[in-house]
Amino acid sequence: MSAEIDPVKLMKQEVGKAAAALVESGTIVGLGTGSTTAYAIQYIGDRLKSGEIKDIVGIPTSFQAEVLAKEYGIPLTTLDAVDHIDIAIDGADEVDPNKNLIKGGGAAHTREKVVDALANKFVVVVDSGKLVERLGSTFKLPVEVIPMAITPVMRAIAKLGGKPELRMGIRKAGPVITDQGNMVVDVTFDSIDNPAELEKTLNNIPGVLENGLFVGVTDVVLVGEVKDGKPLV
Ligand code: 5RP
Protein backbone atom coordinates (compact mmCIF):
# COMPACT_ATOMS: atom_id res chain seq x y z
CA MET A 1 0.00 0.00 0.00
CA SER A 2 1.54 3.38 -0.99
CA ALA A 3 1.70 6.17 1.59
CA GLU A 4 -0.85 8.95 1.08
CA ILE A 5 0.71 12.20 -0.19
CA ASP A 6 -0.67 15.23 1.65
CA PRO A 7 -1.05 17.84 -1.15
CA VAL A 8 -1.07 20.81 1.24
CA LYS A 9 2.15 19.62 2.89
CA LEU A 10 3.69 19.17 -0.58
CA MET A 11 2.69 22.71 -1.56
CA LYS A 12 4.16 24.13 1.65
CA GLN A 13 7.43 22.25 1.17
CA GLU A 14 7.86 23.31 -2.45
CA VAL A 15 7.00 26.93 -1.85
CA GLY A 16 9.31 26.99 1.19
CA LYS A 17 12.11 25.61 -0.98
CA ALA A 18 11.43 28.20 -3.72
CA ALA A 19 11.62 31.02 -1.17
CA ALA A 20 14.81 29.66 0.39
CA ALA A 21 16.38 29.66 -3.11
CA LEU A 22 15.93 33.48 -3.20
CA VAL A 23 18.30 34.00 -0.26
CA GLU A 24 21.75 35.19 -1.33
CA SER A 25 25.10 35.03 0.45
CA GLY A 26 25.93 37.91 2.76
CA THR A 27 22.33 38.96 3.39
CA ILE A 28 20.16 39.68 6.43
CA VAL A 29 17.04 37.52 6.32
CA GLY A 30 13.75 37.98 8.18
CA LEU A 31 12.52 34.54 9.26
CA GLY A 32 8.74 34.24 9.45
CA THR A 33 6.51 32.01 11.54
CA GLY A 34 4.27 29.06 10.70
CA SER A 35 4.35 25.66 9.03
CA THR A 36 5.17 26.98 5.53
CA THR A 37 7.98 29.25 6.66
CA ALA A 38 9.32 26.37 8.75
CA TYR A 39 10.20 24.62 5.46
CA ALA A 40 11.89 27.79 4.17
CA ILE A 41 13.98 27.96 7.36
CA GLN A 42 14.90 24.29 6.99
CA TYR A 43 15.99 24.75 3.34
CA ILE A 44 17.97 27.93 4.12
CA GLY A 45 19.78 25.88 6.79
CA ASP A 46 20.41 23.11 4.23
CA ARG A 47 21.86 25.61 1.74
CA LEU A 48 24.14 27.04 4.44
CA LYS A 49 25.28 23.59 5.51
CA SER A 50 26.08 22.53 1.93
CA GLY A 51 28.07 25.73 1.35
CA GLU A 52 25.74 26.88 -1.46
CA ILE A 53 25.30 30.17 0.44
CA LYS A 54 27.36 31.71 3.25
CA ASP A 55 27.47 34.63 5.69
CA ILE A 56 23.76 35.03 6.13
CA VAL A 57 22.19 36.15 9.36
CA GLY A 58 18.54 35.72 10.36
CA ILE A 59 16.11 37.87 12.31
CA PRO A 60 13.36 35.67 13.77
CA THR A 61 9.76 36.89 13.98
CA SER A 62 8.87 34.65 16.92
CA PHE A 63 10.21 32.28 19.53
CA GLN A 64 9.15 29.44 17.21
CA ALA A 65 11.23 30.85 14.32
CA GLU A 66 14.18 31.37 16.66
CA VAL A 67 14.09 27.75 17.84
CA LEU A 68 13.86 26.44 14.24
CA ALA A 69 16.66 28.70 13.02
CA LYS A 70 18.93 27.44 15.80
CA GLU A 71 17.98 23.85 14.97
CA TYR A 72 18.93 24.35 11.30
CA GLY A 73 22.15 26.24 12.04
CA ILE A 74 21.16 29.74 10.92
CA PRO A 75 23.09 32.44 12.85
CA LEU A 76 20.74 35.03 14.37
CA THR A 77 20.88 38.72 15.18
CA THR A 78 18.49 41.42 16.40
CA LEU A 79 17.11 44.63 14.95
CA ASP A 80 19.39 46.60 17.27
CA ALA A 81 22.44 45.20 15.50
CA VAL A 82 21.50 45.84 11.84
CA ASP A 83 20.42 48.84 9.79
CA HIS A 84 18.36 46.95 7.20
CA ILE A 85 16.83 43.58 6.28
CA ASP A 86 17.47 42.37 2.72
CA ILE A 87 14.68 39.83 2.44
CA ALA A 88 11.93 38.50 4.70
CA ILE A 89 10.08 35.24 4.08
CA ASP A 90 6.79 34.68 5.86
CA GLY A 91 3.50 32.81 5.53
CA ALA A 92 -0.03 34.19 5.53
CA ASP A 93 -3.56 33.09 6.38
CA GLU A 94 -5.19 34.97 3.49
CA VAL A 95 -3.83 36.83 0.45
CA ASP A 96 -6.05 39.12 -1.66
CA PRO A 97 -5.51 40.13 -5.32
CA ASN A 98 -3.66 43.29 -4.16
CA LYS A 99 -1.18 41.16 -2.17
CA ASN A 100 -2.71 42.42 1.09
CA LEU A 101 -2.72 39.82 3.85
CA ILE A 102 -4.33 38.52 6.97
CA LYS A 103 -1.67 37.08 9.26
CA GLY A 104 -1.55 36.01 12.89
CA GLY A 105 -2.85 32.45 12.75
CA GLY A 106 0.19 31.63 14.87
CA ALA A 107 -0.31 34.72 17.10
CA ALA A 108 3.00 36.14 15.84
CA HIS A 109 1.72 38.98 13.63
CA THR A 110 3.08 41.84 15.77
CA ARG A 111 6.74 40.86 15.44
CA GLU A 112 6.11 39.61 11.90
CA LYS A 113 4.82 43.05 10.86
CA VAL A 114 7.89 44.77 12.34
CA VAL A 115 10.32 42.48 10.50
CA ASP A 116 8.39 42.02 7.24
CA ALA A 117 7.71 45.75 6.84
CA LEU A 118 11.41 46.57 7.29
CA ALA A 119 12.57 44.15 4.60
CA ASN A 120 13.70 45.47 1.22
CA LYS A 121 11.94 42.45 -0.28
CA PHE A 122 9.05 40.77 1.51
CA VAL A 123 8.25 37.33 0.08
CA VAL A 124 5.00 35.64 1.13
CA VAL A 125 4.81 31.84 0.92
CA VAL A 126 1.36 30.22 0.79
CA ASP A 127 -0.46 27.19 -0.53
CA SER A 128 -3.15 27.97 -3.08
CA GLY A 129 -5.92 27.58 -0.47
CA LYS A 130 -4.90 30.92 1.06
CA LEU A 131 -5.87 33.02 -1.99
CA VAL A 132 -9.13 34.96 -1.50
CA GLU A 133 -11.00 37.65 -3.40
CA ARG A 134 -11.71 39.58 -0.20
CA LEU A 135 -9.84 39.53 3.12
CA GLY A 136 -11.80 38.12 6.05
CA SER A 137 -13.84 35.74 3.91
CA THR A 138 -12.26 32.53 5.23
CA PHE A 139 -10.17 33.60 8.24
CA LYS A 140 -10.94 35.67 11.34
CA LEU A 141 -8.77 38.75 11.82
CA PRO A 142 -6.32 38.34 14.74
CA VAL A 143 -5.84 41.35 17.02
CA GLU A 144 -3.18 41.35 19.79
CA VAL A 145 -4.44 43.04 22.95
CA ILE A 146 -2.79 43.79 26.28
CA PRO A 147 -4.53 41.65 28.94
CA MET A 148 -5.91 44.44 31.18
CA ALA A 149 -7.69 46.01 28.20
CA ILE A 150 -9.31 42.86 26.82
CA THR A 151 -12.92 43.71 27.81
CA PRO A 152 -13.01 47.35 26.60
CA VAL A 153 -11.18 46.38 23.40
CA MET A 154 -13.70 43.61 22.65
CA ARG A 155 -16.56 46.10 23.25
CA ALA A 156 -14.93 48.67 20.95
CA ILE A 157 -14.47 46.03 18.22
CA ALA A 158 -18.14 45.01 18.54
CA LYS A 159 -19.10 48.69 18.09
CA LEU A 160 -17.17 48.66 14.81
CA GLY A 161 -19.35 45.76 13.63
CA GLY A 162 -16.90 42.93 14.37
CA LYS A 163 -17.60 39.76 16.34
CA PRO A 164 -14.60 39.31 18.67
CA GLU A 165 -13.64 35.98 20.28
CA LEU A 166 -10.82 35.52 22.75
CA ARG A 167 -8.41 32.93 21.32
CA MET A 168 -8.11 29.96 23.65
CA GLY A 169 -5.21 27.54 23.83
CA ILE A 170 -5.09 23.76 23.68
CA ARG A 171 -8.07 22.10 25.43
CA LYS A 172 -9.33 25.63 26.18
CA ALA A 173 -7.38 25.59 29.45
CA GLY A 174 -6.63 29.31 29.13
CA PRO A 175 -6.12 32.07 26.57
CA VAL A 176 -3.31 31.92 24.03
CA ILE A 177 -0.46 34.15 25.22
CA THR A 178 1.78 35.82 22.63
CA ASP A 179 5.57 36.17 22.72
CA GLN A 180 4.93 39.65 24.18
CA GLY A 181 2.74 38.26 27.02
CA ASN A 182 -0.51 39.51 25.50
CA MET A 183 -3.79 37.92 24.34
CA VAL A 184 -5.31 37.51 20.88
CA VAL A 185 -8.86 38.34 19.85
CA ASP A 186 -10.05 36.78 16.57
CA VAL A 187 -12.59 39.00 14.85
CA THR A 188 -15.21 38.08 12.27
CA PHE A 189 -16.23 40.97 10.02
CA ASP A 190 -19.14 40.64 7.57
CA SER A 191 -16.94 42.25 4.96
CA ILE A 192 -13.55 43.98 5.04
CA ASP A 193 -14.10 46.62 2.33
CA ASN A 194 -11.14 48.85 3.15
CA PRO A 195 -8.28 46.87 4.78
CA ALA A 196 -5.99 49.92 5.04
CA GLU A 197 -8.59 51.91 6.96
CA LEU A 198 -9.55 48.99 9.21
CA GLU A 199 -5.88 48.31 10.01
CA LYS A 200 -5.51 51.88 11.30
CA THR A 201 -8.90 51.99 13.06
CA LEU A 202 -8.20 48.82 15.04
CA ASN A 203 -4.70 49.93 16.02
CA ASN A 204 -6.21 53.19 17.31
CA ILE A 205 -8.25 51.40 19.98
CA PRO A 206 -6.39 51.87 23.30
CA GLY A 207 -5.04 48.50 24.42
CA VAL A 208 -4.60 47.09 20.92
CA LEU A 209 -0.96 46.35 20.17
CA GLU A 210 -1.26 45.22 16.54
CA ASN A 211 -3.71 43.56 14.18
CA GLY A 212 -3.09 40.99 11.45
CA LEU A 213 -3.90 43.15 8.41
CA PHE A 214 -0.74 43.64 6.31
CA VAL A 215 -1.54 46.29 3.71
CA GLY A 216 0.94 47.41 1.07
CA VAL A 217 3.82 45.45 2.62
CA THR A 218 4.14 42.44 0.28
CA ASP A 219 6.51 42.46 -2.70
CA VAL A 220 6.23 38.87 -3.96
CA VAL A 221 3.71 36.07 -3.34
CA LEU A 222 4.89 32.51 -4.04
CA VAL A 223 1.90 30.20 -4.33
CA GLY A 224 2.25 26.44 -4.03
CA GLU A 225 -0.03 24.40 -6.25
CA VAL A 226 -0.43 20.70 -6.83
CA LYS A 227 -1.42 19.24 -10.19
CA ASP A 228 -1.81 15.48 -10.77
CA GLY A 229 -0.24 14.83 -7.37
CA LYS A 230 2.88 16.84 -8.29
CA PRO A 231 3.78 20.21 -6.78
CA LEU A 232 3.97 23.33 -8.97
CA VAL A 233 5.17 26.66 -7.58
C1 5RP B 1 1.74 33.37 12.19
C2 5RP B 1 1.35 33.61 10.78
C3 5RP B 1 1.61 32.52 9.81
O1 5RP B 1 2.53 32.96 8.87
C4 5RP B 1 0.31 32.14 9.17
O2 5RP B 1 -0.59 31.72 10.19
C5 5RP B 1 0.48 31.01 8.13
O3 5RP B 1 0.90 29.84 8.75
P1 5RP B 1 1.04 28.47 7.98
O4 5RP B 1 2.16 28.62 7.01
O5 5RP B 1 1.29 27.46 9.08
O6 5RP B 1 -0.28 28.20 7.29
O7 5RP B 1 0.87 34.65 10.41
O8 5RP B 1 1.33 34.42 13.02
Image (cartoon, grey):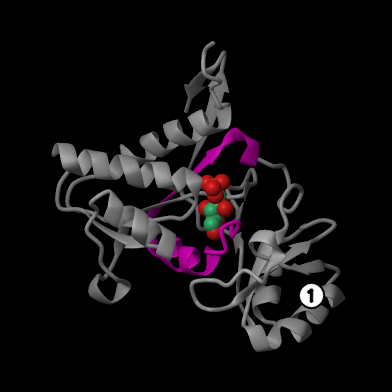
81 vs 153, left or right, is left
How far across and down, in percent of the image, does residue 82 sit?
25, 70
Task: Locate residue 215 relative to residue 134 in the image: left or right.
Answer: left
Frontmost residue, 199 versus 129: 129
Q: Is residue 220 visible?
A: no
Which of 56/184 is in front? 184
Question: Going 52% across and 69% down the picture, which residue do you hit?
Answer: 110
Q: Going by the image, does 171 lie left or right of 92?
A: right
Q: Is residue 12 left or right of residue 192?
A: left
Q: How many marks?
A: 1
Residue labelled with disc 1: 157
The stretch of residues the image draws in magenta is: 103-130
At 62% across and 83% down in the image, what residue appears? 146
| Label 1 Cα crowd, 10 Å radius (few <14 / some 14-19 / many 20+) | many
Residue 125: horizontal and vertical position, in percent?
48, 43
Give the residue at the far top of this rendering: 1
Instruction: Inspect the magenta stretch and tell me whether residue 76 lies in it.
Output: no
Is 120 a magenta residue? yes
The image position of residue 103, as x and y in percent, is 59, 57
Q: Amino acid at mark 1?
A: Ile
**Looking at the image, is 150 positioned above or below residue 11?**
below
Mark 1 residue element: helix
Closest to the observer: 133 or 75? Answer: 75
Q: Which quadrant would residue 47 be assigned to in this image? A: top left
Classify the position of the N terminus by image quarter.
Answer: top right
Residue at 50 percent of width and 77 percent of height: 180
Residue at 64%, 60% (x, y): give it: 170
Across and down, in percent, residue 61 comes to: 42, 63
Q: Does 166 appear above or below 13?
A: below
Is residue 233 something that shows in the picture? yes
